Amino acid sequence: MTNNLDGIKKLTPDEVKKSREIVLDFIGENEPINNFALENKVDSQSVIFDRIKKVDGITKGKEKKIEIEKRIDAEEKITEDRVVEKKSNNQENNNVYQEKERLISEKKKQQQLLEEQKSLKQIRDKESKAKEKELKDKQEENQKEQLKIEQIKEIEEKKILKQKLEQKRRLEKQKKKSDFKKKILKFKKNLKFKALLYLKLFKKYFKKITASLIMLFLLLTIFYIIFCEIVLGFSIDNKAIRQAAKYLFVPALISNSGSVDFYSYKDRLADELNIRGKNVDVRAITKNELLKQIVYKKLAKEYGLVVDSSNLMTDLEKRIVIDKEKNQISLARIAKINDLIKQGKTFEEVKKYSDEFESGVYMENDLAQEKFGRLINYLSEGKTSDILVGDNGYYLIKKNNQNNSLINISYIFIKAITLDDYVNNKLSNLNVLSLVD
């Protein structure tokens, strides 16, 4: 049964309950509603009637029932008023929500507008920066172009200046050349004139000049001979004469290989007297040693050695042993023996061609190195060496075996012309004139 209250449709309890739940969900309220007043009419009445008290098994009168119905109607009206109020509140809330949505939408639009303005500003800033950069690049490019133009201009100016300087130098050079030629021509003319003049004078005074020169030469020669005779005859030894002897050579020994001055002979003779005494022929020994010095100096110059070197004698001894010209025969002999051994001949078969032969000799390693050189260490057992140069000749060595520090070898030796041999041979063939006997 549906009733109308003041033109408003009266809802059933179920509809009221459902509407209330919708309103509460919308406004965010979850409080439980008193379901007693929202129950259907029949249930409410039954509940109320159940609560009616019975007095002595008799129900109260009809007034009581009407009163209850009025109370129910009042409660329903209250409920409907509440529903209307809720609807009104819901409408207000809805308006608030819509207003809120509108504000949010406007705020979003404003934010979007701000973002668009910000984005637009960024784009404008980027465009402005790009333009500035482009302008700056153009300025830099223009500056570079200007710098290049200035550099090219400077180079051209330098080139022009250089050409001017070269032209000026050429002109100066031509002028100097021309002046030099003029001077040469003038000098030739003067020289020709003077030459003719001197030639006339020479022809005029030739005999007198020649005679004067011959007389001067003879006088100087006589003076030199007298000076030498005085020094040698009286054996004068003082600082003044020694100083003069540096410019006027006073010979003591004259040979076809060289000469020895008087004061070198005198100093060497004094040294030999101090060393050997007077019991031996010191003069002969001194002459021999001085003549040896002449041969040593000549040989050193031949080999390109320093004459005043402290190792001169050692170097000469090594050089003369390997000198193919002075040891031609000895080198040919050792080469021939080496060829025979390579052809298969044994040491015993070729020993007759050697100056010295040893077979199966044991030597200490140090002694062998000292005599034959370090190459003997690298020679394999049973192998024959190439030609080895010793202090006084040439060797061919066969290494039989080696036991710790002992080496068993066989060798062939050919004697070379040594420094002493060469010097003694030279002295024997030397023509010597002694002025100090």
Image: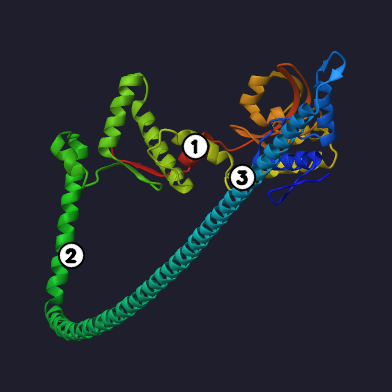
> Can residue 224 be seen in this snapshot?
yes
Give amino acid for label 3.
Asn
Are the residues flagged by discs 3 and 2 in contact, CB closer than 8 Å? no
Looking at the image, is mark 1 or mark 3 nearer the viewer?
Answer: 3
Mark 2 — residue? 214
Up-down: is 395 above or below 97?
Answer: above
- Give left or right: position of 8 versus 342: left
Mark 1 — residue? 315
Q: Secondary structure at mark 1?
A: helix
Q: CA distance from mark 1 to mark 3?
A: 134 Å
Quadrant in which the C terminus appears? top left
Mark 3 — residue? 89
The mark that comes first in sequence, 1 or 3, is 3
Residue at screen point 20% across, 37% down: 233
Up-down: is 332 above or below 357?
Answer: below
Residue at screen point 20% across, 48% down: 225
- Give left or right: position of 363 versus 423: right
Give amino acid for label 2.
Ile
Looking at the image, is mark 3 or mark 2 nearer the viewer?
Answer: 3
Residue 332 falls in which quadrant of the image? top right
> Can residue 230 be seen in this snapshot?
no
Give amino acid for label 1.
Asp
Mark 3, other Cα within 10 Å: few <14 / some 14–19 / many ≥20: some
